[in-house]
Image (cartoon, rainbow, N blue to C red):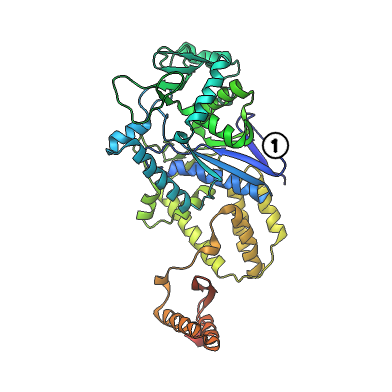
Amino acid sequence: MPLALYDTWSRTVRPFTPIHANRVGMYCCGPTVYDHAHIGNLRTYVFEDILRRVLMHNGYEVRHVVNITDVGHLTSDADEGEDKMEKGSRRTGESAWSIARRYTEAFVADWRALHLLEPALWCRATDHLAEQIAFIGDLERNGYAYRTSDGLYFDTSKQDDYGFLARLNRAGLQAGKRVAVGEKRSSTDFALWKFSPTDVARQMEWDSPWGRGFPGWHIECSAMSAKYLGTWFDIHCGGEDHVAVHHSNEIAQTQAAHGTRLANFWMHGHFLTFDADTKMSKSSGDFIRLQTLQSRSIDPVAYRYLCLTAHYRSKLRFSWTSLEAAQTALNRLRHLYAGWPEGGRIDHAFAARFDAEVNDDLNLPRALAVLWELSRSDLSPANLRATVDRFDDVLGLRLSEWRPATSNIPENIQILLSEREQARSEKNWAMADHIRETLSKYGWRVEDNKEGQHLIKVHEPSDDSR
């Protein structure tokens, strides 16, 4: 089945065809690094990782770019309040630059713990001030920017289709005045460049043609994605909360400067919620980090597995019970896989069914169902392993890297393993092979690699070896 993806712009699932043959440009909105990411944030990055893996599974070379917002994201979508980096600095007592480094490092650690593929490029907003200023200059020359006492703003009234991505009712917004306007011409207008306040010292500010200040939040993504992927690329991703404001404004800027909607596909992951359908957020206090799971002896990969059990365009309700069930399922799968020997062949019937599900707008719940059906099939153990290896290229569970904890290995088995290691160091290959056979009778398979010996529990020992 050819790959088809849901496009928020068209509100349809449509066939995916890359702009350039066999190459895909993919931009994903990254974190604002004023605090730790919570697991609700991380669900979006798991979805984007699966998308990238499915694209690669279909033979495409993917240039994946992720931004780091370390300036310009105000506490209000109406461009009011203070910069979140300055707020984080005041909360922690550290400099804004220091917390940007610390929370970026923490985010990358979470990224790796979830087995997310490294992007081709991490790009920081503060490293691209020249590109943002140049982009704003283009907007000003094209007649889309106007000045107020606190900054330079984008004039959304110049675009008849502003907000089409979110199907915004601009007339209703104006009539209701649900957003403070101030000196803005329209409630939907947004900041391109904010002037530094005269009564408060800022840590992050730069000179510009319009005065000393800092960029608005939306301009960074338009400028950096255009620099690294061009002004018309394949896929732009983010959370569903980006549709109405951030992504609508990115599109408006790029249309005004370059005449495109920036990306051919706009894709959005939905929220992680609690039982009352409350969105997990920092402001609400419902703030569960990946480290919170680890403190309760939950493997971060179990959270990845949990994310795979719901379609990315449906809300995923979080509970400790559902997470523990995901941990149980992951452990079962790991042990099954570890007991299957290498050297088998991929079963193409099961592979075709799996591919059809993941190519149907990333239907991972149904793809997991295919995997579990496969595990119960009458295929040979070696063929089971080979086929699951192929599935895991998409699932990203890294089953082949998992090993049982040493503490689960009986003492007599550990002694035999030590004796075998000694035999190997003495190049006594006959003794090493004899101990391998003995371990096999006890239900353990030993594998040798450049890192040493690894034991895998295969089955219960036979009666004559007890």
Instruction: Please state which of residues 324 and 37 is positioned toward the viewer in this rendering.
Output: 37
* Up-down relation of residue 128 to residue 333 (above or below): above
Q: Is residue 353 visible?
A: yes
Asked if 108 appears above or below 169 in the picture, the reply is below
Left or right of 247? Residue 58 is: right
Where residue 77 sits: x, y (%)? 43, 25
Q: Residue furthest left?
A: 93
Amino acid found under the numbered disc labelled 1: Ile
Task: Give neighbour class at mark 1: few <14, some 14-19, many 20+ (Cα, 10 Å).
Answer: some
For this rendering, which residue is in front, 119 or 331? 119
Which of the 4 image quarters holds residue 148?
Answer: top left
Total labels: the figure holds 1
Residue 365, horizontal then vertical, whole percent: 58, 49
Label 1 sits on a secondary structure element that is loop
Q: Is residue 168 left or right of residue 57?
A: left
In the image, residue 71 lies at what x, y percent?
41, 32
Query: Measuring 41% from the left and 77% from the top, which residue is drawn there?
Result: 410
Q: Is residue 286 visible?
A: no
Residue 308: x and y in percent read: 54, 49
Q: Is residue 35 left or right of residue 458?
A: left
**Residue at the disc numbered 1:** 19
Q: Quadrant of residue 184?
A: top left
Q: Residue at x 56, y 70 (%)?
A: 339
Residue sitting at x 34%, y 38%: 285
Please say if 258 is above or below 143. Answer: below
Which residue does the image show at 56% across and 23% down from the upper left?
Answer: 253
